[in-house]
Image: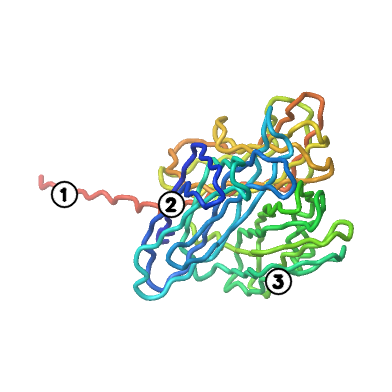
Amino acid sequence: MPARQSFYAESLAESSTTSADWTNTLSLTFTPDDNADYWLFASAAFTNSSGTNDHVGWASVYHVQAETVLLEQSMQRQEASSPQDWVGFFGIAKLSFGTAPGEQQLDVNINSSHAGDTTKIRDVRLLLIKADPADAYAESLAQVNTGSTSWQTATTLAFTPGSAGDYLVIASATRASDANLGAMRCRLNDVNGGATYGDRAWYCKDDWDNQPFAVMEKLSLTAAARTLQLQYRSESGTLCYLQGARILALRLDAFDNAWFALNHATQNTTSASNQDFLTLSATPLALPHAVIAIGAYNTASTTVSSYLNVAKDGGTMEEWNREAPNAAGWQFAGLAQRQTLAAVATTWKWRGRAETAGTTINVGNLAIAVLQLEATPTAQRRRYMAVAA
């Protein structure tokens, strides 16, 4: 099958600002096809130096030509040092273009809500993949809120596959609470399948925290109507907010090769050394691939940090850490990368550890997908010449 056109940019080094004005940290310039849709995946880790009430660091993805903010999140640190918190920045989006769209630019920008505070970002990645007609998508970008502890539906994806097949389903949103240390929950609800994913309590540090929810699942669907919902609710009645609710279903047989591993169950360790919690093994072709990893983590302590990282062949690709504002609270994180792989056996892992041995850290809703973006080369046919005796 044809290649999945993609565009990619990354900046892994740490960038920082003390300005309240937006500061650019990464730009992706690309020229899309006429009348085409693209799926955007954005990931990073970011932090802010201040613990003062209502002081946060911001990060955003901005589409220059459309003058549109596609994703915007913020955080206030719990732990200032040893180690300073680095929380996840993650989200998906849809970009649609008409005839002769011309060159486009996406910027990842950061600022500090209050000048003088230091906001930092690292491991910044932007990945665009051209949509396939068999993909499905729904979004509701406006901010919504509730104080109810009953589930509210933020967006619904209802579609009917043209034929039976596997789909990689990703849900993402940005959430906030109306009170310091307020809590809320989000989940992906597979209405027809009778299953939900990602339901874990998230506690803000500050009521200006706007942080990601994300979950990923592989579904084997028949050619029958399917309904998926991204839902949210308050944990205990405090007003909570959600915006940028999106659900994407990628048809996996639209990629020549795709590998996937997941474990939604809660796992834990008290070790201060990295422990493996999920492993994906594959022997890819020597071609560009998309690597998408999504997971959640928690430390059962408000004085000790937990670490969560994605590794390839033992080397860390990206890491996040957080000292919990509430020991019951979970953080979500994700990575989206394009990389030309070697044609050798390769492993990707979700790993975690505690800052101090003896403190329990929990992980859950772990998933890794590796998608071949280029078409598999056609084998060369050998020609033989008959030689007369």
| Image: 289 above or below 327 | below
The residue that appears at 53% across and 47% down in the rendered structure is 291
The residue pinned by badge 2 equals 27
Real-space CA distance between mark 2 and mark 1, rounded to the nearest whole angstrom: 57 Å
Q: Nearer the viewer, residue 91 or 248?
A: 91
Mark 3 and mark 1: Cα distance apart in space: 61 Å
Q: Which residue is drawn at 71% across and 38% down?
A: 322
Residue 85 x, y percent position in the rendering: 68, 37
Task: For marks 3 and 1, give the one nearer the viewer.
Answer: 3
At mark 1, the secondary structure is loop
Single out the mark in the foreground, 2 or 1: 2
Instruction: Determine the image quadrant of residue 192.
Output: bottom right
Residue 227 is marked as 3
Kind of residue indicated by mark 3? Thr
Residue 21 at x, y = what percent? Answer: 53, 52
Question: In the image, what residue occupies the spot 26% across and 49% down?
Answer: 382
Residue under pointer 1: 386
Residue neighbourhood size for the residue with mark 2, other residues' Cα within 10 Å, grouped as few (<14), some (14–19), many (≥20): many
In which quarter of the view is residue 80 placed?
A: top right
Q: Is residue 278 visible?
A: yes
Residue 367 visible in the picture: no
Q: Which of marks 3 and 1 is nearer the N terminus?
A: 3
Vertically, is 373 above or below 266? below
Distance Cα–Cα, label 3 vs label 2? 35 Å
Disc on res. 317: none
